Amino acid sequence: MRGIDLAARTLALALALATPTLLPPRAEAQDAAPDKARDAWDAVFIGGRKVGHIHLRVEPVTAGDGRELLRVQVDSRLNIKRLDDDVVIATRYGTIETYDGRVLRLDARSLVGPNETRISGDARDDILPLTLEAGGQRRRVEIPWGDDVRGPYGPELSLSRSPMTPGERREIKTFIPDLNQVGLTVLEAREVEEVELGGDTTMSLLKVESQVKGPDGKPLPGMDATYWADSGGQILKSHTDAFGGILTYRTTKEAAEAPGSGSFDIVKASIVRVSRQITNSTGTRSAVYRVSYSGDTPIEEVFPADDRQTVRRATDGSTLLDVHTSGPRDGSGGPATVEPEYLAANPMLNSEDPGVVALTRQAIRGAADDPWAKAVAITDWVAENVREKNFETAFATARDVARDLSGDCSEHSVLTAAMCRAAGVPARVVVGLLYADDLGGFGYHMWNEVHVNGRWVAVDAALKQTEVDATHLKLNATSLDGVSPYAQFLDVVRVFNTLSLEPIEVR
């Protein structure tokens, strides 16, 4: 089975940004009785199947200086399938904040399979110092902050405290989980309409459209959502288009936690279908694809140009993507050195971990003292020694992979990158698409690029390829550095339900 990854992480991100974290029924009741804890439960459906729930808890707390504050905690749990394997995606977003919504402390945790990442920090003055903990490492960064920045549930809190009316527009600065950035949520209230809530129940609810923008002011792909709120500002239903439609409904604790009605396979749901089969895909040396894309991003940004791939316009006006294999001496060379981040250890690529270092020494023993020879030796070693090729682990750190030697393409890629860095070879992770024969299209995949001879050269340990075939389509390359290593995965979200590919020439 060819490695396909990223969908689980992308789903966690999509849910974090686009589904509502529902707040107490009315601000008046909250302000009048601040000592009462509140609970809200929502059931989550994807593709018509119940996959999990979201649980909000709000409770008053008293600070050491006597201030009355709120603790808000939002937990979500999703159970999905990745082909033959079951995966649990769990997130927890918590804040301590004032009654008017000013965030004092933030704590966010994501658990995908057995792997946890945590972000935490206490706001002070005009900054929020954030610490990322993953794979036994910590990384600290400061992001701009202000009293007007709200937590991940801020837009819903705004609705609850001050219900919107048709035609109203509202903007809320919002902390974006997993990206660990401050963005802008734009709410636009439309009309009141009759809405089905399940069980033959309908209600007159206000339709509110939501769009999340990143720090650059551009809409984040796949994060547009629609909420339906009652007269008290409670969101009783939400919808986002990702994965064929993610729906949430307000319900009881018992209904929210009840088992799902069927399994949702996130890998199969995220396949980019093609009009014709590609035979001998792993042996493909060059290919031309006709690209149809309905998103807002220029196609040249969706598929960045490099020595392997370029976008061009055909004489009939259609868009073509040319892809071919490329080795360590092909194409035009560039600078001999690269940014330090491609050699440095970070919380995801633990190249200084003793286990990773030991495996690196083992892999390059006997290899020539040459960057490309070391990269080839490491790629081959990872391909041969990551023995259990499963989809249970959605995104592990290199340290974890070095210990367990199991996983799919993401585990192959993080271990390959970390081992290359440990050997002194600059390396990064590539996020993109890969043709899967048995799934009838392109799925999401991760591989690597190593920097040799002034060139970034692709290698794929999951497929044991040091000359990567022409069915690898790159969307982005990342060092996985910083406090938001998952930001690059938005390029995967960008092409959900917006991209189709037609292979017109394959050799």
Image: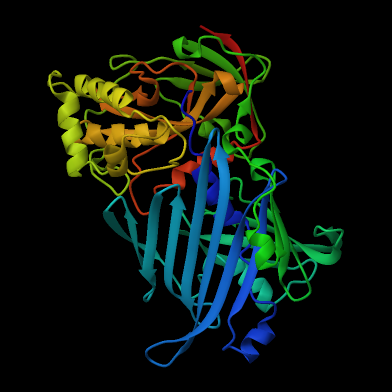
Of 7 and 386, the residue lying toward us? 386
Q: Residue at x 64, y 70 (%)?
A: 40
Q: Which residue is drawn at 67% across and 75% down?
A: 160
Of 467 and 341, the residue lying toward us? 467
In the displayed structure, would residue 122 be above or below residue 422? Answer: below
Of 153 and 58, the residue lying toward us? 58
Left-right relation of 433 to 134: right
Q: Which residue lies furthest to the top in this view?
A: 507
In the displayed structure, would residue 64 be above or below residue 121? Answer: below
The picture quadrant where one finds residue 31 is: bottom right
Quick check: can you spot residue 179?
Answer: no
In the displayed structure, would residue 393 be above or below residue 1? Answer: below
The picture quadrant where one finds residue 325 is: top left
Left-right relation of 35 to 129: right
Left-right relation of 91 to 319: left
Quick check: can you spot residue 97?
Answer: yes
* Residue 255: percent from left, percent from top: 69, 61
* Residue 152: percent from left, percent from top: 53, 64
Q: Which residue is drawn at 13% across and 23% down?
A: 365
* Residue 23: percent from left, percent from top: 63, 72
Left-right relation of 198 to 269: right
In the displayed structure, would residue 235 be above or below residue 85? Answer: below
Q: Residue at x 53, y 41 (%)?
A: 86
Question: What scheme was used to colour the molecule?
Answer: rainbow
* Residue 465: percent from left, percent from top: 36, 18
